[in-house]
Image (cartoon, rainbow, N blue to C red):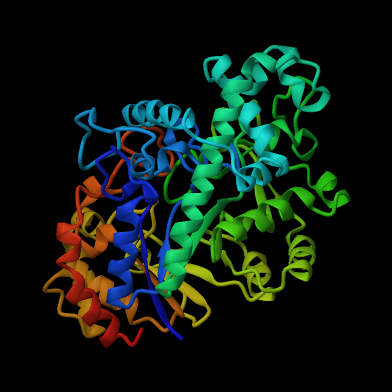
Amino acid sequence: MRKAGLLLAISSLPSKYGVGDFGGKAFEFIDFISDTGIKIWQILPLNPLGYGNSPYQPYSSKALDELYIDLDEFVECGWIQCDDLPDFKTSSVDYQRAREYKVKKIKEAFYHFEKTPDYLAFIQEDWVYDYAVFISLKKQNEMRPWYEWSKEESAWIYDKQYDISHLEQEIELEMFIQYMLLKQWKKLCAYAKSKGIKIMGDIPFYVGRDSLDVWSNQNCFLLDEDYVPTFVAGVPPDYFSVTGQRWGNPIYDWDYLIGTDFNFWVDRMEYASKLYDIVRIDHFRAFETYWKIPASCETAMEGEWIEAPGKLFFDYLLKKHPDMQIIAEDLGLPRKEVYELRDHFNFKGMKIVQFTFDPNETNNNFEDRVNMIIYTGTHDNQTIKGWFDSLEKDVQIEVQRLLKIEGYEAKNIVDDFCCFTLSSIAEIAILPIQDVLGLDDYARMNTPGTIGSPNWEWKLQDFNELFMQREKLRDWIKTTNR
């Protein structure tokens, strides 16, 4: 059955608290998409935001970011009052102010919380206490990365010699935060399921150096004796950057991972599948070949492609979990072996429609397939309006001509692209909310190769304009038979 989905980060939901969260607006959004016939809600990673507020450089693969806590639930419980709201921006996320306010209120709520059997069972999960210690030590060190702490602090994860008793209250607070986040997220997911909506979540291929993942699994990465990566991750020069993208994440020690039955990766995938109905692996191509950059290089121009044991890993993973729903983000210029790996396991790949019509883009000119997800664009692309407006006039005319051949008159170029995407034979078609609303590049979520504002900051001011698109979406779903 062909299905349609919408792409919207949790942080981009409307909110009086300065950032979208797991509260009432998320439930309203589920009601809206269910009413239009949409079956999939794709989000971005929910893990604690790292450098530049990027959800792809998180402090943990399992913990969730405190920003997403629904404070209204604490108000209803009588734990807090929220009559001192700052004057938050309405159309963008001010991460620092939103976090400061939410943390203050979460601390107030924590002092009213009484431990339940469910909470006591939750904190027995192996990662929960370790993450609480990790983030508490970071705060003690003014949020400096773990490899800049004292030797005693950095070594705690292995030898437990450093005395952390003075952090007991802070550690308890962090465990409470994670408990409430997971409880609220599960409630939201259950509601989506009751409405016939599946949640598609992302799992980044790499993890951040300054993360619990690396701190507690140092043998899984190519690090020297001082915890410094000897090689780092990225991609060579491409469509987005003439110097490539040097992400800086540590590279996996695949020999070690093979020797441990890929335990680190299996554990990540198992947990992601508990959070999401469908797991999209970002930068899937690195399971076949990855760009290995010497850590001494300042750009990604120097490096080499190294083969990875992707087939061996997925054989092992899917033998344990044959029903795991996996999407392969296979964009870029991968060699044919990447597609062979994807197809061997029958994973859906991806296609970006705006690339298909872009004469400067040559890596997306392949026929639509049923076993595929097609997008107008993703969080890394311009909006359709922003992209079209940036084209030279003669290219715009050619794009409109090609659309007309396909039966679209380009009276509204954005709507035509949305309908063209939904009309694909691909089993799943995803539209970013920005394209449903016809917004230009002020609403772009991220520009690859750049760090910091305005990346990751766009959010809906309210639902008014979106809800006015209800009938249009219903019509699109009906006429494209999704």
The residue sitting at the left extreme is 411
Q: Residue at x 50, y 43 (%)?
A: 180
Q: Quick check: 249 above or below 367?
A: above
Q: In what quadrant of the picture does the C terminus appear? A: bottom left
Give the residue drawn at x 27%, y 45%.
Answer: 15
Residue 231 in sight here: no
Give x and y (percent) for residue 322. 71, 73
Quick check: 307 above or below 141? below
Q: Residue furthest right?
A: 259
Q: Nearer the viewer, residue 168 or 402?
A: 168
Q: Is residue 181 left or right of residue 72?
A: right
Which residue is more in the foreground, 90 or 476?
90
Closer to us: 25 or 414: 25
Q: Is residue 62 left or right of residue 108?
A: right
Number of marks present in the image shown = 0
Q: Position of residue 321 (x, y in %)?
A: 72, 68
- The answer to whether 372 appears left or right of 18 in the picture is right
Residue drawn at point x = 18 percent, y = 68 percent = 469
Q: Quadrant of residue 195?
A: bottom left
Q: Where 234 sits versus 440, above or below?
A: above
Please state which of residues 68 and 299 is positioned toward the viewer in this rendering: 68
Q: Is residue 479 left or right of residue 450?
A: left
Q: Is residue 267 visible?
A: yes
